[in-house]
Amino acid sequence: MSTKKRVAATVNGDAAEFLCEPRQSLLEVLREVLSLTGTKEGCNDGNCGACSVIVDGTLVNSCCMLGVEIDGCEVETVEGLARNGKLHPLQKTYLEETGMQCGFCTPGFLMSSKALLDAHPDPSERQIRHWLSGNLCRCTGYDKIVRAVQKAARMLEAER
């Protein structure tokens, strides 16, 4: 019998306190405890990137991290991209460039793209392709996604 652990973190800019089993993955906590269902479960073993989130500025596969590990951390999920009803530039450009089809992998791609642009505001096409190599999509070619990230980088640069 396991005892639930108390966890306090900042999730998408808001304080969050919750109880979770020590064995629950961050993915399970986000979806089942915090009702943040934008993060998707694809492979559940760190190979597809559908569950990508940002923890303390680092891109992680939430299926490979325990929920208790985010105690005291700042977590960003796809639900936190839009602010005050305004889409993040990545969300806009993914729509404009049709960088998704079924949309299942899109939250992970968006979070990976955000982590890339946070670390490298003006990435080359090669950097984008390398950075996104941990995210798999079965429906679309990656060219539209790469164009969306390039366009978002230009938009974010113009905002600075």
Image (cartoon, rainbow, N blue to C red):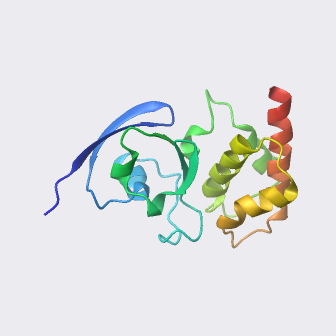
Residue drawn 59% across and 63% down? 49
Q: Give the residue displayed 65% in from the left and 53% down from the top.
A: 112
User: Where does residue 82 sit, x and y in percent of width and height?
Assistant: 63, 36
**Residue 147 image offset from top left, x and y in percent:** 86, 54
Q: State the quadrant of the C terminus.
A: top right
Q: Judge whether residue 159 can be spotted in this image.
A: yes
Q: Residue at x 86, y 57 (%)?
A: 125
Q: Which corner quadrant holds the N terminus?
A: bottom left
75 and 84: which is toward the camera: 75
Residue at 72% x, 59% y is 131
The mark tally for this picture is: 0
- Kindly indicate the quadrant of the structure image that contains residue 104: bottom right
Left or right of residue 62, residue 131 in this image: right
Considering only vertical position in the picture, is 138 above or below 114?
below
- Residue closest to the eye, 85 or 43: 43
Residue 48: image location, x then y, percent: 59, 69
Relative vertical location of residue 137 with respect to residue 124 in this rendering, above or below: below
The residue most toward the left is 1
Residue 126 vs residue 105: left or right? right
The reply to whether residue 52 is in sight is no
Residue 21 location, quadrant: bottom left
